[in-house]
Image (cartoon, helix red, strand yellow):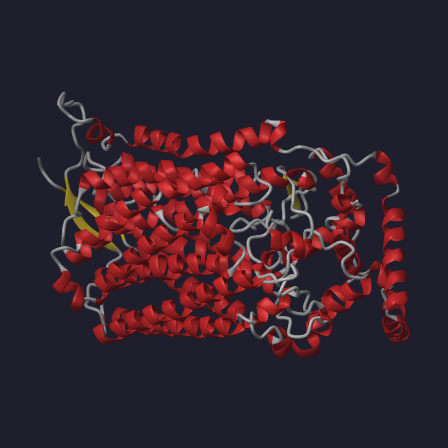
Amino acid sequence: MELETYYYNNRIVKAFLYATIFWATVGFFAGLVIALMLFYPEFPEFLLGNKLRNSQGIMGFGRWRMLHTSTTVFAFVGNVIFTGSYYSLQRLLKTRIFSDSLSWIHFWGWQIFILSTWITFLLGINTSKEYAEHEWPIDILIFFIWIVYGINMIGSILKRKIKHLYVSVWFFLGTWVAVAMLHIFNNLELPISLISFKSYSIYAGVQDALMQWWYGHNAVAFILTTPILGLMYYFVPKASNQPIFSYKLSIIHFWSLIFIYIWAGPHHLMYTSLPNWAQMLGTIFSIMLIAPSWGGMLNGLLTLRGAWKKVKKDPILKFFAVGITCYGMATFEGPMLATKTLNSIGHFTDWVIAHVHLGTLGWNGFMAFGIIYWLTQKLWNTKLYSILLANIHFFLGILGIILYVFPMYFGSVLQSEMWKKFNPDGTLTYKNFLDTVLSIIPFYKIRFIGGIIYFIGFILMIYNIVKTIKKGYFLNDEFFQGIPFYDNSHNNKNEKFHSWLEQRPIQLTILSFIAVAIGGFIEIIPTLVIKSNVPTINSVKPYKALELEGRDLFVREGCNACHSAQVRPFRDEVVRYGEYSKAGEFVYDHPFLWGSKRTGPDLAREGGKNPNSWHYKHMHNPRSTSPGSIMPRYPWLIYNKLDRSNTEKKIKAMIKLGVPYTSVDIKNLNHDMDFQANKIVSDIYNEYPEIKKEIDLQKVKEKEKFIPLEKREVIALISYLQRLGIDIKS
């Protein structure tokens, strides 16, 4: 049959490659900022000085943490996925990408989504749900762009010039299906109005927690893992000039991984108020995950079995080999952390941070660097500018990871042991939570140094890439030849099922959806529909209007990034915080705010522990109440006027979600808010008269611009903090 001439679209690959490098720089920088703030909380004051009070929280730790995670996950890793998939799909399918127009809509839409994330998060517009903090208009934008990507990918598959779908294509399809499902169900939220960014999750408490970590864990699975495995199956054989070690193993790897992974989310909620049966399922399937994960790791490493001499000389293969090894280490560590013994030590500590960064810096980062180096040479038809610089980058990257990860391991075990230590008389040895934080600050400093070293290596890579590009020439439309179509009418009776399936993308996609949907539905539906899973507690009442506004401020500032709100049934936690948490406490919490890290103490029983004036001073300057505290200051809360314009809409939205507010609550809304605020201010003035003198001076100085203390944001936040745990205590 006569060959016809076609052209691959390299422009879109180049665009995503540039975006990957740009957003990686931004994401790594944001990570360094929050790593610095963990031992130098005065950093925002150093930058802004007296303007901090008017900054509206633009340098708030919680906001920058969200920016860091979202940028590294969706901007850095997301863009490298699209870079690699647009390049590899065209070559694996022997066809130009389905639509150049859709490709550019996808590219610019994704960059607009990331830019809008930065704008909204800096402004405090977020939902608090980890890896899914984007508010509802951005969630819709993400879904639209993801559909565009899917159409472009599936369209390319349908017009391919060969029958067979290589394993990389399966992983791309599985990723697309799973992420779409996860995104839709986790981000079902009710906006308070169509002209407001503010929304509330339709799920509450335990149900919301399960849904979030079903998404949160599998965002790691289907954004940070499966598509990178698809890239591994393409780029490692290409770079090493070796065939994949075992095609049969890749089949087992793919189906077992996407089926098992989806069940493991509840291991993020061990010892919490989640029903025990769900926790147990999370543990069982997490341990089962070791088999398919290590199957993929071994398949990748053994692909290099005949090229180890080449690995010594080629920095690209070095990055791939270490990246795959980090994948194996992280996917062994994760299941181990899902066991109850290790979870009781590691949960809420920096062990989890170390685990995540072993994956992102080692697995995602090193695989991305190898792909960037390899693609730059291919796209610009040249050799790498400097092998030496690439090798230096490699060793700096390894050193950075070691100095980042291992101090976090040591610090987490030390802090966890300090939390649990008792004196012979039965009292806590370290009753003050802050003592345990101060003990691990040296590890935070070492981690920061590790991050800088890793970042320096990355900067060297950028220089190397720029110099490589300058000495090469780019081909926008790469020439290739192929047959115009293939004959699919011929059926081989002896053909095995999977060989048959690999030629049918629609059936493959449907089966992938079924595989990833089963586990989620089995875990989530009973929690949503069976009432006994979340027994009610009569003493638990909805938040008052001022408390609800305070809770929204807590979300706005990302406070749940550092403070958990879940007392586990451990002796030390009950002694330190109070009665352990129960599912019925959270039935009115839209969204849940259990948190995943204790940089500060748990707040589940915070109500009544400290006087109102203490909270006021703590927000103004945490070190005035807690010497040595690493919590940043929040002076804007002290001076900002509380916006009540949407309070009624918020109450009405909560009513739609099943929270039992009444028409009387709405009618008396402002009166009740004033009454509660005035009581808090009166307590503050009585407890600490100096504050009243300060406010009186402000009144004289600011005149008509003066905002009474009872009208300010800090009072609403105090009302929320003082409510926490009160219903259970009563």
On screen, residue 349 versus residue 601, left or right, reads left
> In which quadrant of the rendered view does residue 562 lie?
bottom right
Q: Position of residue 205 (x, y in %)?
A: 63, 41
The answer to whether any part of residue 669 appears in the image is: yes
673 or 597: nearer the viewer:
597
99 or 67: nearer the viewer:
67
Q: Is residue 163 above or below residue 596?
A: above
On screen, residue 266 versus residue 533, left or right, reads left
Q: In the rendered view of the protein, which quadrant contains the N terminus?
A: top left
On screen, residue 226 versus residue 419, left or right, reads left
Give the total number of marks visible in the rendering: 0
Query: What residue sits 85% from the left and 71% below the top?
Result: 691
Q: Position of residue 355 (x, y in %)?
A: 42, 57
The answer to whether any part of residue 17 appears in the image is: no
Q: Is residue 35 above or below residue 155?
A: below
Q: Position of residue 219 (x, y in %)?
A: 45, 46
Q: Residue furthest top?
A: 493
Query: What residue sits 29% from the left and 39% below the top?
Result: 254
Q: In the rendered view of the protein, which quadrant contains the C terminus?
A: top right
Query: What residue sits 65% from the left and 61% below the top?
Result: 425
Q: Position of residue 170 (x, y in %)?
A: 29, 39
> In which quadrant of the rendered view does residue 120 lie?
bottom right
Query: What residue sits 90% from the left and 61% below the top?
Result: 682
Q: Residue furthest left?
A: 1
Q: Is residue 228 above or below residue 322?
A: above
Q: Residue furthest front?
A: 424
